[in-house]
Image (cartoon, rainbow, N blue to C red):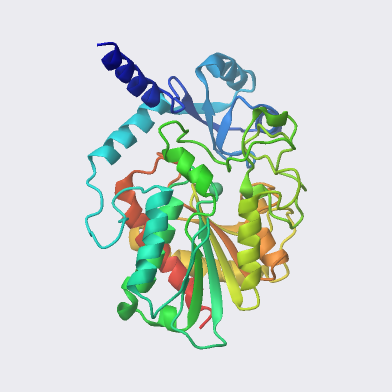
Amino acid sequence: MKLLILLSVLAVSAIASQKRYDGYQLFQVTPKDQSSFEAMVQLYEQSENYDFWIAPRGIDFAMDIMVPPAYTSVFVDLMHAYSMEYRVEMIDVQTVLDMAREERERTPRVATPRYSVDWNTYYDFNDISAFCNEIAAAHPNMRSYESRAIPMVKISTGGSGKKAIVVDGGIHAREWISPAFVTWLINELVEKYAAHPQYVDNVDWYIMPVINPDGYQFTFALTGDRLWRKNRRPNNDGIGGSSCMGTDMNRNFGFHWNEGGSSANGCSDTFHGGAAFSEVETQHVRDAVLAVAGQAEMYLTFHAYGQYWLTPWGYTATLPSDYTQLYNLAVSACNKLTAVYGTRYTIGSSTNVLYVASGGSDDWAKGGAGIPFSYTVEMRDEGLYGFELPARQILPNNLEVWEGVKVMAESLF
Ligand SMILES: [Zn+2]
């Protein structure tokens, strides 16, 4: 009898040890004047208590902020003090996470037994790694697979002198739609090759579906945190010491690193690391990209959410000298994207459309690796579900973004 009791306690504590968000609320806030905007920027930069799912952009731009129950009343007081418009988008974040998990548990795994993943639900890092190996093994004459902690799939029909496109996903752990799109892209290029051979015959692809494996896996783990963003290396080099985990890999790249929009506080969700490329994951991505930089003409990095097709720079409001080219190509891509379901994307440079954020991978790809066409794509949605985009939206999202990616690729033919 004692043994049975012990077992049941262990089982309960295992379930209970994933980070919970009971009573956390997601607020949408729209500052209407400079003083209230500045109050929100101060909160964003200086408080660890609030999780900004969408960061402050400017007056009249809505932001999404997750507020813990202990801070709800002080937060609402702040709203009233500045006469800010707000509404509660999620009255209990844990309920939203629970519903999504229950739906995942009800979804049968892998309708097509050929591979370890499909695109009817979200899969963890082990399944995605297995998929990269399986699709490589199934098409030995089409591309090679480079086995390392961070899987990279090269898709090529051979020949020399071709331009290349580098694609990555999963740099921010909680943005699950990103690996769900990037794995789908691999499948579309390889398995549907016969339907559109030009996208593989004319360019080589180097695709990394999850460049933050530890963080991504932590968002699935029973002992983890569905809303984790950073990698999982303990911090000794940030303010806050070793009490906090993780570096924001998309603030850790070495081009104008630490020039704004990132934090020196190791407990912050935008901690930029102790130095540029301090993280083993960003080092791997840097080395993998530099190895093909002579061939690569385009870099696409997939994130969520907000529906933006962003150009450099993130570190400054000054536009790159070839901005018109970058912008016009993004307009063509988004026109095709929108034509599928009517989903609208905002186009522009990261700093001007969103906010200053230095150390981003797109800035480094362009400024550091010399890849001219560099874009960050923030996919669905606009905040209704945020990071918990329902699995039934994976395929519609992928189909529309694919239309944009095709336009991007065609520009290199
Ligand atoms: Zn992101």
Q: Is residue 236 above or below residue 112?
A: above
Which percent across, then down, holds residue 293? 64, 73
Q: Is residue 245 among what the camera can see?
A: yes
Q: How many marks?
A: 0
* In the depicted structure, whether residue 3 falls above or below residue 301: above
Image quadrant containing the N terminus: top left
The part of the image, by quadrant, that contains residue 370 is bottom right
- Residue ID at (58%, 40%): 232
Q: Can you give x and y, in whole percent of width and height, for residue 111 in the image?
A: 22, 55
The answer to whether residue 134 is left or right of residue 374 is left
Find residue 194 and report its horizontal and vertical position in percent. Answer: 31, 80
Camera-side residue: 252 or 278? Answer: 278
Q: Is residue 372 visible?
A: no
From the viewer's side, name the closer residue of 119 and 93. Answer: 119
Considering only vertical position in the picture, is 79 above or below 103?
above
Q: Is residue 401 left or right of residue 63?
A: left
Residue 137 image-quadrant placement: bottom left
Front residue (pair 261, 245)? 245
Q: Is residue 115 left or right of residue 72?
A: left
